Image: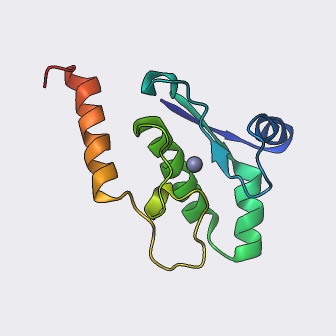
């Protein structure tokens, strides 16, 4: 798995591929199987812009965006949820950091174990 930080033209180009709005902070192109989801893109310039506008530290925003995209690589599709780190948009107004739900964390652990030890565990 790789997370690639994009900025400038590449960010615009990739954003166009997914019909992203200016609020889109990244994306993970996924096919039909989780094996297809091995590369995620995070739009660094957009995070920087939003960080300046919202006064939320850039490091925090980067961490949230990267964790969200890793979630797309590890969870079954569709992987957005109404709560937590997999919400479709960042919740900057909240002081509590969003996390994976307990069910999402269990799924991620199981999938990582499956990758590490094979499917017979
Ligand atoms: Zn997402």
Q: Which residue is drawn at 47% across and 38% down?
A: 77
Residue 75 x, y percent position in the rendering:
41, 40
Residue 58 appears left or right of 104: right
Instruction: Judge left or right: residue 74 versus residue 94.
Output: left
Q: Position of residue 94 (x, y in %)?
A: 53, 78
Q: How many numbered badges does the structure rendering display?
A: 0
Identify the colour scheme used.
rainbow
Name the side, left or right, on which 81 lies relative to 50. Answer: left
What residue is shown at x 40% (from left), y 62% (from top)?
A: 99
Residue located at (55% from left, 64% from top) = 60
The residue furthest left is 121
Image quadrant in which you'd find residue 46: bottom right
Give the image location of residue 37, x and y in percent: 51, 28
Determine the residue located farthest toward the right in the rendered image.
9
Question: Residue at left 75%, top 70%?
Answer: 52
Q: Nearer the viewer, residue 50 or 29?
A: 29
Q: Where is residue 81 in the image (x, y as percent from the top left)?
A: 47, 56
Q: Quadrant of the C terminus?
A: top left
Q: Is residue 73 left or right of residue 8?
A: left
State the residue in front, 49 or 83.
83
Q: Is residue 17 positioned above or below 93 on the image?
A: above
Q: In this view, does 68 lie above or below 18?
A: below
Q: Does residue 59 lie above or below 33 as drawn?
A: below
Q: Which of the 4 image quadrants contains residue 14?
A: top right
């Amino acid at each position: 798995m790789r997370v690639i930080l994009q900025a400038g033209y590449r960010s615009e180009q990739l954003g166009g591929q997914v019909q992203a709005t200016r609020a889109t902070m990244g994306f993970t192109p996924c096919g039909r199987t989780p094996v297809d989801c091995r590369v995620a893109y995070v739009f660094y310039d957009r995070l920087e812009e939003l960080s300046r506008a919202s006064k939320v530290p850039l490091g925090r925003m980067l961490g949230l965006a990267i964790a969200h995209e890793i979630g797309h690589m590890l969870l079954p599709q569709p992987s957005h949820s109404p709560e937590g780190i997999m919400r479709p948009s960042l919740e900057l107004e909240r002081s509590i950091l969003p996390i994976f739900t307990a069910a999402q964390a269990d799924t991620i652990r199981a999938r990582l174990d499956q990758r590490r030890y094979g499917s017979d565990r």
